[in-house]
Structure formats: C-alpha cells, structure tokens
Amino acid sequence: MSYFNNRRKPPSEHVYADTVIWQCSECNCWSRKEFIYVDEPICPMCTGRMNQEAKSIRVE
Ligand SMILES: [Zn+2]
C-alpha cells in the first residue's frame, strides 16, 4: 500500500512583483501608487507624510 500516489502537490510558490507604493513615514500603512491621485498623499491612518518606495507585492 503506497501513499505516494495520493499525495497532494505542494502549494505553488507565490509570485511577487516590484510595485511603486506610498509608504507612511509614521506607521506601517501603505498604498499602491496607482490608487493615489495626489502628489503628496497623507496617511489615512495617522495623517503622517508618505514616501514613494518600491515594494515587492504578492500578485499570485
Ligand atoms: Zn501612517
């Protein structure tokens, strides 16, 4: 009796993509740049200043 044939495939690895985001300088809040339509966004959580950064975001 073999269990090997009944094994499920391991979950595939997640895919990440470098994306431009706005990162809050005061807390961990961030948002993708494509959702922000102002030049100098303010953090919705703490009203801190946000800095533009590149972040690897999981896309799959
Ligand atoms: Zn914040």
Image: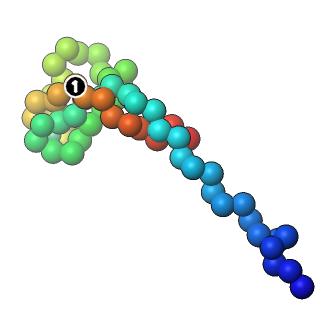
Ligand 1 falls in which quarter? top left
Disc 1 marks a residue whose amino acid type is: Gln
Residue under the image location 16 percent in, 19 percent down: 40
Residue at the far bottom: name it. Answer: 1
Q: Residue at x 23, y 41 (%)?
A: 29
**Of helix, strand and loop, which one carries label 1?**
strand
Coordinates of residue 4 in the picture (x, y in percent)? 80, 73
Q: Residue 31 sits in which quadrant?
A: top left
Give residue 48's position: percent from left, percent from top: 10, 35
Label tally: 1
- Residue appearing at x 10%, y 41% in the figure: 26
| Residue drawn at x 34%, y 29% as measured from the top left | 32
Q: For the C terminus, give its image quadrant.
A: top right
At label 1, counting other C-alpha atoms closer than 10 Å, the crowd grade (few under 14, some 14-19, many 20 or more) is some
Residue 46 in sight from this viewpoint: no
Q: Is residue 4 left or right of residue 24?
A: right
Percent position of residue 58, x then y: 46, 41
Name the residue nearer the viewer: 29 or 8: 8
Determine which residue is flagged by label 1: 52
For residue 32, side relative to residue 3 (left or right): left
**Image quadrant assignment for residue 53:** top left
Residue 27 visible, this orientation: yes
Q: Residue furthest right?
A: 1
